[in-house]
Image (spheres, helix red, strand yellow):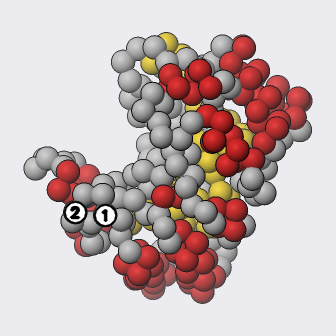
Amino acid sequence: MSIAAYHSILFGPIRSRRFGTSLGINLTPTPRTECGPDCLHCKTAYAASVPIVSRAHILPSSGLIVTNAARRIIEIQRAGEKLESLAVSGTGDPTMHPNLLEISENLRDLKAKWFPKAKLNLLSPSQALSSPELRAVCVIYDRAVFAFEWGTAKTYDTFRPNATLDYKTLVDRLQGLDRWSAQATFVQGALDNSSDREVQGWMKKIEELRPREVYLLTTEGKAKAGIKSVPLSKLEEISAKLVEKTGIPGHVVTREAQPA
């Protein structure tokens, strides 16, 4: 397996803690022109053989994404390797891609042909949720996972001071989805969404939004200065209270070496 290359359209397969052996498909890769000469990600993984967007702020076309995904999926299948999921994500928010529905339909068909037992997953940090066809997109995926980890607009603004999507709009857009899963990372310190009051507010919103399930994640990699993950026991407590209050399944997922 390879190291994730966040500037490429494809990365992996990697071992995902939730989705098994997973091929990442990045709809909003960072242009290599924005990187320094010693960028680790540009030197690793599948980046050397996958076309990179050459100009800032230009998203790869749906044809480029699907063609390269198809080539890689076929390579993996013919090599007799294992693939348990395709994970559609982005260096930004994959819902920003204007052809998200078309890409999703093509990936579903590729998966069905070459790895019919694999799952198709969408992972969004909920930074945009801008696809006008997002509701139709969600039903294509086995899991459409969106970040939601703020109980109040005040906390949301603290965590995302430069967000273009305000808290009310975020809630409204999630409210319109039929099949989706939520994920949340609770931290404390300079940024904190783990107080009892905040968690209660978050749980109330989750009850209103009614996702199919909720993933509670520990922080990835090294925590930022002054910020640390809440203890695992706290996450388990939140998960138990979530199930008791809302009936929505909660899954505590501990940290692993690779993202997803």
Image position of 17 (left or right of 211): left
Query: Within 10 Å of the Cα at label 2, are there few (<14), some (14-19), or many (20+) other Cα atoms?
Result: few
Check residue 58 in the rendering and tell me which mark sits there, or answer none: 1
Which image quadrant for residue 133? Answer: bottom right
Image position of 91 (left or right of 253): left
**Residue 219 in the image: x percent, y percent?**
50, 31
Check contact, mark 2 vs mark 1: CB within 8 A. Answer: yes
- In the image, what residue type sits under mark 1? Ile
Judge by depth and name the residue closer to the eye, 120 or 59: 59
Q: Is residue 23 above or below residue 102?
A: above
Q: Which residue is mark 2?
A: 55
Spatial distance from mark 2 to mark 1, Cα to Cα?
A: 6 Å
Image position of 198 (left or right of 79): right
For residue 130, say whether it is visible: yes
Residue depicted at x 63% and y 41%: 169
Judge by depth and name the residue closer to the eye, 18 or 248: 248
Q: Is residue 167 above or below residue 177?
A: above
- In the image, what residue type sits under mark 2? Arg
Q: Is residue 121 above or below residue 259?
A: below
**Residue 34 in the image: x percent, y percent?**
20, 51
Quadrant, the N terminus: bottom left
**Residue 213 in the image: x percent, y percent?**
76, 46
